[in-house]
Amino acid sequence: MEARPTADRLGRRDAVLAQMEAHALEVEQSTADLSAREDRFVELVVRTNNGVTAARDAGYRNPDSAAVKLLGTQKILDAIEARRTAEAIRVQAAAKKMSSRA
């Protein structure tokens, strides 16, 4: 039979999870300044993995050409990569939290 987590162990886990979330936020904020619409586009690309849909839903008038242009812009690509990295960190933190409950 496995022992229940101690308060000390739970405190360390919480500290690690807080550190992981801080790192995720740092990664997200490390990208160049984006307009509100560019930020929405990045959020939607990460969620849907579809540039045209993301451009349309972010309010671009010509989503096909906007998607091509935006996905060819380095600051947008950097922001997408940062958001994906932050999401991966959060998934790892959630897995760590779930595994420590077992």
Image: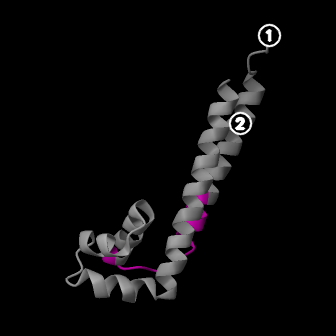
Residue behind mark 1: 1
Left or right: 43 in relation to 75:
left
Tell us which disc is closer to us: 2 or 1.
1
Mark 2: which secondary structure?
helix
Frontmost residue, 98 versus 7: 98
* Amino acid type assigned to the residue bearing label 2 in the image: Arg
Point out the image quarter for the C terminus.
top right
Q: Quadrant of residue 81?
A: bottom right
Height in image: 1 above or below 36? above
User: Per the image, is 29 magenta?
Assistant: yes
Count of number-bearing discs? 2
Bounds of the magenta segment: 24-37
Residue 76 appears at what percent x and percent y? 46, 80
Give the residue displayed 59% in from the left and 58% down from the top. Answer: 24
Q: Quadrant of residue 41?
A: bottom left
Point out the image quarter for the N terminus.
top right
**How busy is the neighbourhood of tag 1: few (under 14 within 10 Å), some, or many (20 plus)?**
few
User: Per the image, is 68 magenta?
Assistant: no
Height in image: 1 above or below 80? above
Residue behind mark 2: 13
